[in-house]
Amino acid sequence: MKLIFNKFFEQINRYTDFLYFIRDSRKITTRAKKETHEAYLLKIQVTWEIFAEELLVNCLKLNTSQFEAYKEIKLPQKLSYAVCQTLISGIGYFDIKNASNLKKIAADILVPIHNPFKVIPKDSADMIDDFYKLRNYIAHQSLHACRSLSKMYRDKYPRQRYIFGYGVDHKDVRQEDIPILIDLYSAEVSFTDYCIGRLIEQVKRLGLWDNTIIAFSTDHGTHLGEQGCIQKQAKLLNSCVARIPLIIRHPDKSPGGRRIAALTSHLDFMPTFLSLLGVEGYTDTDGRNMWEVVTGNKREIHEHVITGFNNFGSVHTLKWHYFQNVWKDDPGLGPALHDLEKDPGEETNVVEHHPQTAAEMKTLLNEAFKLSLA
Protein backbone atom coordinates (compact mmCIF):
# COMPACT_ATOMS: atom_id res chain seq x y z
CA MET A 1 0.00 0.00 0.00
CA LYS A 2 2.90 2.34 0.72
CA LEU A 3 4.06 1.91 -2.88
CA ILE A 4 0.63 2.94 -4.17
CA PHE A 5 0.58 6.05 -1.94
CA ASN A 6 4.14 7.04 -2.84
CA LYS A 7 3.63 6.57 -6.56
CA PHE A 8 0.45 8.64 -6.45
CA PHE A 9 1.94 11.58 -4.55
CA GLU A 10 5.09 11.55 -6.69
CA GLN A 11 2.97 11.95 -9.82
CA ILE A 12 0.83 14.70 -8.28
CA ASN A 13 3.91 16.62 -7.10
CA ARG A 14 5.42 16.33 -10.57
CA TYR A 15 2.28 17.70 -12.20
CA THR A 16 2.03 20.50 -9.62
CA ASP A 17 5.65 21.57 -10.13
CA PHE A 18 5.12 21.66 -13.88
CA LEU A 19 1.97 23.80 -13.50
CA TYR A 20 3.90 26.28 -11.34
CA PHE A 21 6.60 26.39 -14.03
CA ILE A 22 4.00 27.15 -16.71
CA ARG A 23 2.33 29.78 -14.56
CA ASP A 24 5.60 31.65 -13.90
CA SER A 25 6.95 31.46 -17.45
CA ARG A 26 7.04 34.72 -19.39
CA LYS A 27 7.54 32.99 -22.72
CA ILE A 28 4.14 31.26 -22.77
CA THR A 29 0.96 33.04 -23.87
CA THR A 30 -1.99 33.38 -21.52
CA ARG A 31 -4.14 31.17 -23.76
CA ALA A 32 -1.47 28.45 -23.87
CA LYS A 33 -1.21 28.60 -20.08
CA LYS A 34 -4.96 28.10 -19.72
CA GLU A 35 -4.99 25.17 -22.15
CA THR A 36 -1.99 23.54 -20.45
CA HIS A 37 -3.57 24.08 -17.04
CA GLU A 38 -6.80 22.40 -18.15
CA ALA A 39 -4.89 19.48 -19.68
CA TYR A 40 -2.96 18.86 -16.48
CA LEU A 41 -6.11 19.12 -14.40
CA LEU A 42 -7.34 16.20 -16.47
CA LYS A 43 -4.07 14.31 -15.87
CA ILE A 44 -4.39 14.88 -12.12
CA GLN A 45 -8.01 13.72 -12.14
CA VAL A 46 -7.17 10.51 -14.02
CA THR A 47 -4.23 9.87 -11.68
CA TRP A 48 -6.57 10.27 -8.69
CA GLU A 49 -9.15 7.87 -10.15
CA ILE A 50 -6.49 5.22 -10.75
CA PHE A 51 -5.05 5.69 -7.27
CA ALA A 52 -8.35 5.46 -5.39
CA GLU A 53 -9.53 2.46 -7.39
CA GLU A 54 -6.21 0.63 -7.07
CA LEU A 55 -6.24 1.21 -3.32
CA LEU A 56 -9.76 -0.15 -2.84
CA VAL A 57 -9.19 -3.09 -5.17
CA ASN A 58 -5.97 -4.19 -3.44
CA CYS A 59 -7.59 -3.93 -0.01
CA LEU A 60 -10.65 -5.91 -1.15
CA LYS A 61 -8.40 -8.57 -2.65
CA LEU A 62 -6.94 -9.24 0.83
CA ASN A 63 -10.29 -10.10 2.38
CA THR A 64 -13.75 -10.18 0.75
CA SER A 65 -15.78 -11.40 3.74
CA GLN A 66 -17.30 -8.01 4.60
CA PHE A 67 -18.05 -7.29 0.94
CA GLU A 68 -19.92 -10.63 0.77
CA ALA A 69 -22.00 -9.68 3.80
CA TYR A 70 -22.68 -6.19 2.42
CA LYS A 71 -23.86 -7.47 -0.98
CA GLU A 72 -25.35 -10.70 0.41
CA ILE A 73 -23.40 -12.88 -2.00
CA LYS A 74 -20.87 -15.72 -1.76
CA LEU A 75 -17.51 -15.36 -3.51
CA PRO A 76 -14.62 -17.79 -4.10
CA GLN A 77 -11.84 -17.63 -1.50
CA LYS A 78 -9.22 -16.16 -3.84
CA LEU A 79 -10.16 -13.52 -6.38
CA SER A 80 -8.04 -11.98 -9.10
CA TYR A 81 -7.30 -8.26 -9.26
CA ALA A 82 -9.54 -7.98 -12.33
CA VAL A 83 -12.52 -9.52 -10.53
CA CYS A 84 -12.02 -7.26 -7.49
CA GLN A 85 -11.81 -4.28 -9.83
CA THR A 86 -15.16 -5.27 -11.34
CA LEU A 87 -16.70 -5.59 -7.87
CA ILE A 88 -15.46 -2.13 -6.87
CA SER A 89 -16.86 -0.57 -10.04
CA GLY A 90 -20.18 -2.30 -9.40
CA ILE A 91 -20.77 -0.58 -6.04
CA GLY A 92 -21.00 2.89 -7.58
CA TYR A 93 -17.40 3.93 -6.96
CA PHE A 94 -17.56 6.50 -9.76
CA ASP A 95 -20.54 8.20 -8.11
CA ILE A 96 -18.62 8.93 -4.90
CA LYS A 97 -18.52 12.68 -4.29
CA ASN A 98 -16.21 13.29 -1.33
CA ALA A 99 -13.98 11.85 1.39
CA SER A 100 -16.85 10.97 3.74
CA ASN A 101 -18.52 8.89 1.02
CA LEU A 102 -15.22 7.19 0.20
CA LYS A 103 -14.72 6.39 3.89
CA LYS A 104 -18.28 5.06 4.13
CA ILE A 105 -17.94 2.81 1.10
CA ALA A 106 -14.61 1.51 2.44
CA ALA A 107 -16.22 0.85 5.84
CA ASP A 108 -19.07 -1.04 4.15
CA ILE A 109 -16.92 -3.40 2.09
CA LEU A 110 -13.50 -3.69 3.80
CA VAL A 111 -12.69 -5.48 7.03
CA PRO A 112 -11.27 -2.91 9.52
CA ILE A 113 -7.73 -4.31 9.50
CA HIS A 114 -7.53 -3.79 5.72
CA ASN A 115 -9.38 -0.45 5.59
CA PRO A 116 -6.90 2.39 4.92
CA PHE A 117 -9.62 4.98 5.54
CA LYS A 118 -10.53 3.72 9.02
CA VAL A 119 -8.43 6.46 10.57
CA ILE A 120 -7.54 9.22 8.16
CA PRO A 121 -6.01 12.62 9.08
CA LYS A 122 -8.06 15.72 8.32
CA ASP A 123 -5.49 17.08 5.87
CA SER A 124 -5.67 13.83 3.90
CA ALA A 125 -9.49 13.97 3.91
CA ASP A 126 -9.33 17.58 2.70
CA MET A 127 -7.02 16.51 -0.12
CA ILE A 128 -9.44 13.76 -1.13
CA ASP A 129 -12.28 16.29 -1.16
CA ASP A 130 -10.20 18.58 -3.37
CA PHE A 131 -9.57 15.77 -5.83
CA TYR A 132 -13.26 14.91 -5.96
CA LYS A 133 -14.17 18.54 -6.63
CA LEU A 134 -11.63 18.51 -9.44
CA ARG A 135 -12.92 15.20 -10.72
CA ASN A 136 -16.53 16.36 -10.81
CA TYR A 137 -15.54 19.64 -12.43
CA ILE A 138 -13.65 17.85 -15.19
CA ALA A 139 -16.25 15.11 -15.69
CA HIS A 140 -19.44 17.15 -15.67
CA GLN A 141 -18.72 20.75 -16.66
CA SER A 142 -17.58 21.91 -20.05
CA LEU A 143 -15.78 25.24 -19.89
CA HIS A 144 -16.04 25.49 -23.65
CA ALA A 145 -19.82 25.20 -23.58
CA CYS A 146 -20.25 27.72 -20.75
CA ARG A 147 -17.79 30.11 -22.33
CA SER A 148 -18.99 30.21 -25.92
CA LEU A 149 -21.65 27.78 -27.13
CA SER A 150 -24.13 28.76 -24.40
CA LYS A 151 -24.54 32.09 -26.21
CA MET A 152 -26.15 30.19 -29.08
CA TYR A 153 -29.14 29.57 -26.83
CA ARG A 154 -29.06 32.26 -24.16
CA ASP A 155 -27.07 35.49 -24.09
CA LYS A 156 -27.88 36.42 -20.51
CA TYR A 157 -28.57 34.43 -17.40
CA PRO A 158 -28.09 35.19 -13.69
CA ARG A 159 -24.46 34.21 -13.22
CA GLN A 160 -24.48 35.72 -9.73
CA ARG A 161 -26.51 32.72 -8.56
CA TYR A 162 -25.40 30.12 -11.10
CA ILE A 163 -25.45 27.00 -8.95
CA PHE A 164 -25.99 24.18 -11.38
CA GLY A 165 -22.75 22.30 -11.10
CA TYR A 166 -22.75 18.53 -10.70
CA GLY A 167 -24.44 17.56 -7.44
CA VAL A 168 -26.69 20.64 -7.30
CA ASP A 169 -28.89 20.92 -4.22
CA HIS A 170 -32.31 20.53 -5.84
CA LYS A 171 -34.13 22.62 -3.28
CA ASP A 172 -32.18 25.63 -4.54
CA VAL A 173 -33.54 25.28 -8.07
CA ARG A 174 -36.41 27.64 -8.91
CA GLN A 175 -39.01 27.17 -11.61
CA GLU A 176 -37.59 30.09 -13.59
CA ASP A 177 -34.22 28.29 -13.65
CA ILE A 178 -35.52 25.41 -15.78
CA PRO A 179 -35.41 27.22 -19.18
CA ILE A 180 -31.84 28.29 -18.38
CA LEU A 181 -30.87 24.70 -17.59
CA ILE A 182 -32.41 23.48 -20.83
CA ASP A 183 -30.54 26.12 -22.84
CA LEU A 184 -27.20 25.33 -21.20
CA TYR A 185 -27.79 21.61 -21.69
CA SER A 186 -28.42 22.35 -25.37
CA ALA A 187 -25.05 24.11 -25.39
CA GLU A 188 -23.40 21.00 -23.98
CA VAL A 189 -25.05 18.93 -26.73
CA SER A 190 -23.74 21.36 -29.35
CA PHE A 191 -20.26 21.11 -27.87
CA THR A 192 -20.46 17.31 -27.99
CA ASP A 193 -21.57 17.50 -31.62
CA TYR A 194 -18.59 19.75 -32.39
CA CYS A 195 -16.20 17.26 -30.73
CA ILE A 196 -17.69 14.33 -32.66
CA GLY A 197 -17.12 16.31 -35.85
CA ARG A 198 -13.45 16.75 -34.94
CA LEU A 199 -13.16 13.02 -34.25
CA ILE A 200 -14.67 12.14 -37.64
CA GLU A 201 -12.37 14.60 -39.40
CA GLN A 202 -9.34 13.00 -37.77
CA VAL A 203 -10.51 9.47 -38.68
CA LYS A 204 -10.80 10.59 -42.30
CA ARG A 205 -7.46 12.39 -42.17
CA LEU A 206 -5.79 9.17 -40.98
CA GLY A 207 -7.30 7.22 -43.87
CA LEU A 208 -9.39 5.02 -41.56
CA TRP A 209 -12.89 6.09 -42.58
CA ASP A 210 -13.58 3.18 -44.93
CA ASN A 211 -12.82 0.46 -42.38
CA THR A 212 -13.86 2.05 -39.08
CA ILE A 213 -17.06 1.56 -37.09
CA ILE A 214 -18.06 4.62 -35.04
CA ALA A 215 -20.70 4.30 -32.31
CA PHE A 216 -22.19 7.14 -30.29
CA SER A 217 -24.01 6.50 -27.03
CA THR A 218 -23.95 7.54 -23.37
CA ASP A 219 -24.31 6.06 -19.90
CA HIS A 220 -27.65 7.64 -18.94
CA GLY A 221 -30.04 10.47 -19.72
CA THR A 222 -30.87 13.47 -17.56
CA HIS A 223 -33.83 15.24 -16.01
CA LEU A 224 -34.40 18.86 -16.95
CA GLY A 225 -37.25 19.76 -14.62
CA GLU A 226 -39.59 16.80 -15.10
CA GLN A 227 -41.67 16.49 -11.89
CA GLY A 228 -39.18 18.82 -10.20
CA CYS A 229 -36.16 16.63 -10.96
CA ILE A 230 -32.79 17.96 -12.13
CA GLN A 231 -29.90 15.86 -13.50
CA LYS A 232 -30.23 12.09 -12.99
CA GLN A 233 -32.51 11.15 -10.11
CA ALA A 234 -33.21 7.53 -9.34
CA LYS A 235 -36.51 8.34 -7.65
CA LEU A 236 -37.92 9.21 -11.10
CA LEU A 237 -36.43 6.35 -13.11
CA ASN A 238 -38.36 7.16 -16.27
CA SER A 239 -37.12 7.25 -19.85
CA CYS A 240 -35.49 10.65 -19.31
CA VAL A 241 -32.78 8.76 -17.45
CA ALA A 242 -33.16 5.13 -18.57
CA ARG A 243 -33.36 5.69 -22.34
CA ILE A 244 -30.16 6.55 -24.19
CA PRO A 245 -29.17 7.37 -27.76
CA LEU A 246 -27.32 4.86 -29.93
CA ILE A 247 -26.02 5.87 -33.36
CA ILE A 248 -23.76 3.50 -35.29
CA ARG A 249 -21.86 4.38 -38.44
CA HIS A 250 -20.65 1.32 -40.36
CA PRO A 251 -18.53 1.26 -43.55
CA ASP A 252 -21.18 -1.02 -45.05
CA LYS A 253 -23.81 1.56 -45.91
CA SER A 254 -26.56 -0.90 -46.89
CA PRO A 255 -28.47 -0.60 -43.58
CA GLY A 256 -27.77 3.14 -43.36
CA GLY A 257 -30.40 5.74 -42.51
CA ARG A 258 -32.66 3.35 -40.60
CA ARG A 259 -34.25 4.05 -37.22
CA ILE A 260 -34.91 0.81 -35.37
CA ALA A 261 -37.49 0.58 -32.59
CA ALA A 262 -36.36 -2.82 -31.25
CA LEU A 263 -35.27 -2.85 -27.61
CA THR A 264 -31.56 -2.97 -26.78
CA SER A 265 -29.43 -2.25 -23.74
CA HIS A 266 -25.85 -1.52 -22.71
CA LEU A 267 -25.39 -5.27 -22.18
CA ASP A 268 -25.74 -5.75 -25.93
CA PHE A 269 -22.77 -3.53 -26.79
CA MET A 270 -20.07 -6.13 -26.07
CA PRO A 271 -21.45 -9.07 -28.13
CA THR A 272 -22.51 -6.70 -30.94
CA PHE A 273 -19.20 -4.89 -31.43
CA LEU A 274 -17.11 -8.01 -30.91
CA SER A 275 -19.12 -9.71 -33.64
CA LEU A 276 -18.73 -6.71 -35.97
CA LEU A 277 -14.97 -6.91 -35.43
CA GLY A 278 -14.95 -10.61 -36.28
CA VAL A 279 -14.39 -11.78 -32.71
CA GLU A 280 -16.65 -14.78 -32.12
CA GLY A 281 -17.10 -17.27 -29.31
CA TYR A 282 -18.42 -14.93 -26.60
CA THR A 283 -21.73 -16.72 -26.16
CA ASP A 284 -21.93 -16.79 -22.34
CA THR A 285 -23.02 -13.16 -21.94
CA ASP A 286 -26.18 -11.44 -20.76
CA GLY A 287 -26.22 -9.24 -23.86
CA ARG A 288 -27.17 -10.18 -27.41
CA ASN A 289 -25.98 -9.20 -30.85
CA MET A 290 -28.21 -6.28 -31.86
CA TRP A 291 -26.73 -6.19 -35.39
CA GLU A 292 -29.01 -9.10 -36.28
CA VAL A 293 -31.91 -6.68 -35.93
CA VAL A 294 -30.13 -4.09 -38.07
CA THR A 295 -29.58 -6.59 -40.89
CA GLY A 296 -33.14 -7.92 -40.63
CA ASN A 297 -32.15 -11.42 -39.49
CA LYS A 298 -34.29 -10.91 -36.37
CA ARG A 299 -37.23 -8.65 -35.57
CA GLU A 300 -36.23 -8.28 -31.92
CA ILE A 301 -33.69 -9.52 -29.39
CA HIS A 302 -35.52 -8.51 -26.19
CA GLU A 303 -39.17 -8.43 -25.17
CA HIS A 304 -38.17 -6.09 -22.32
CA VAL A 305 -35.09 -4.41 -20.87
CA ILE A 306 -34.20 -3.80 -17.24
CA THR A 307 -32.54 -0.72 -15.75
CA GLY A 308 -31.16 -0.44 -12.23
CA PHE A 309 -30.05 2.82 -10.61
CA ASN A 310 -29.31 3.18 -6.89
CA ASN A 311 -32.36 1.82 -5.02
CA PHE A 312 -34.69 1.76 -8.04
CA GLY A 313 -35.36 -0.53 -10.97
CA SER A 314 -37.35 -0.18 -14.18
CA VAL A 315 -38.81 -2.41 -16.89
CA HIS A 316 -39.22 -1.08 -20.42
CA THR A 317 -41.22 -2.70 -23.22
CA LEU A 318 -42.39 -1.15 -26.48
CA LYS A 319 -45.78 -0.60 -24.81
CA TRP A 320 -44.98 0.09 -21.13
CA HIS A 321 -42.43 1.72 -18.86
CA TYR A 322 -42.58 0.73 -15.18
CA PHE A 323 -40.34 1.70 -12.26
CA GLN A 324 -40.33 1.36 -8.51
CA ASN A 325 -38.12 1.17 -5.45
CA VAL A 326 -36.42 -2.24 -5.23
CA TRP A 327 -34.16 -1.68 -2.23
CA LYS A 328 -34.67 0.04 1.15
CA ASP A 329 -37.73 2.15 2.01
CA ASP A 330 -37.77 5.36 -0.06
CA PRO A 331 -40.60 4.96 -2.64
CA GLY A 332 -39.40 7.93 -4.68
CA LEU A 333 -42.02 8.83 -7.30
CA GLY A 334 -43.05 5.21 -7.85
CA PRO A 335 -44.46 2.75 -8.33
CA ALA A 336 -45.22 4.26 -11.71
CA LEU A 337 -46.55 2.73 -14.92
CA HIS A 338 -46.69 4.66 -18.20
CA ASP A 339 -48.46 3.72 -21.41
CA LEU A 340 -45.86 4.70 -24.02
CA GLU A 341 -48.32 4.52 -26.92
CA LYS A 342 -50.82 6.95 -25.38
CA ASP A 343 -48.37 8.90 -23.19
CA PRO A 344 -44.90 9.00 -24.81
CA GLY A 345 -43.87 11.85 -22.50
CA GLU A 346 -44.60 9.64 -19.46
CA GLU A 347 -46.61 12.33 -17.71
CA THR A 348 -49.51 10.19 -16.46
CA ASN A 349 -49.06 7.38 -13.94
CA VAL A 350 -51.64 4.66 -14.73
CA VAL A 351 -50.38 2.04 -12.27
CA GLU A 352 -53.73 1.92 -10.42
CA HIS A 353 -55.64 1.39 -13.68
CA HIS A 354 -53.53 -1.56 -14.84
CA PRO A 355 -52.76 -3.70 -11.75
CA GLN A 356 -52.19 -6.87 -13.78
CA THR A 357 -49.57 -5.18 -16.00
CA ALA A 358 -47.88 -3.67 -12.94
CA ALA A 359 -47.75 -7.11 -11.31
CA GLU A 360 -46.15 -8.58 -14.43
CA MET A 361 -43.53 -5.80 -14.45
CA LYS A 362 -42.79 -6.42 -10.79
CA THR A 363 -42.28 -10.13 -11.50
CA LEU A 364 -39.68 -9.22 -14.14
CA LEU A 365 -37.87 -7.01 -11.60
CA ASN A 366 -37.91 -9.85 -9.07
CA GLU A 367 -36.36 -12.20 -11.63
CA ALA A 368 -33.74 -9.68 -12.77
CA PHE A 369 -32.61 -8.56 -9.31
CA LYS A 370 -33.32 -11.85 -7.50
CA LEU A 371 -35.79 -10.16 -5.15
CA SER A 372 -39.16 -10.99 -3.65
CA LEU A 373 -41.07 -7.74 -4.07
CA ALA A 374 -44.65 -8.11 -2.89
Image: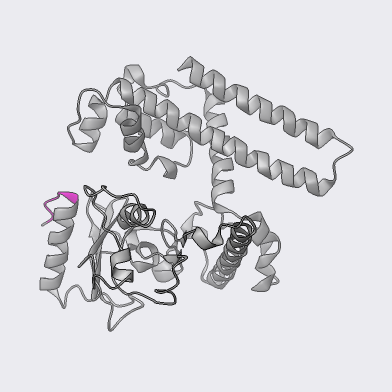
Where the N terminus falls, by quadrant? top left
The magenta span reads 369-373
Residue 157 seen in render: no
Q: Residue at x 43, y 43 (%)?
A: 94
Of residues 121 and 9, the one drawn nearer to the viewer in this rendering: 9
Apparent side of residue 263 relative to residue 228 in the rendered image (left or right): left
Relative depth, front residue between 44 and 106: 44
Decide: is 331 above or below 258: above
Left or right of residue 270, residue 65 in this image? left
Residue 114 in the image, given as x and y percentages of width and height: 35, 19
At 23% across and 76% down in the image, what residue appears? 319
Q: In the rendered view, tell whether residue 151 sits above or below residue 51.
A: below
Query: Would you say 364 lies left or right of 219 here?
Result: left
Q: Residue furthest bottom?
A: 342
- Percent across and percent down for residue 21 are 79, 31
**Residue found at x 36% / y 34%:** 85
Q: Which residue is at 67% across, 58% downward?
A: 144
Q: Is residue 357 above or below residue 62?
A: below
Residue 60 among magenta residues: no
| The quarter of the displayed image where residue 325 is located | bottom left
Residue 7 visible in the displayed image? yes
Instruction: Tell me residue 13's x, y (percent).
Output: 66, 25
Horizontal side of 163 relative to 282 (left or right) equals right
How many marks the image carries: the answer is 0
- Quarter of the image where one finds residue 108: top left
In the image, residue 197 lies at what x, y percent?
A: 61, 64
Chief SS of the magenta region:
loop
Asked whether 291 or 9 is in front, the reply is 291
Is 197 in front, or is 16?
A: 197
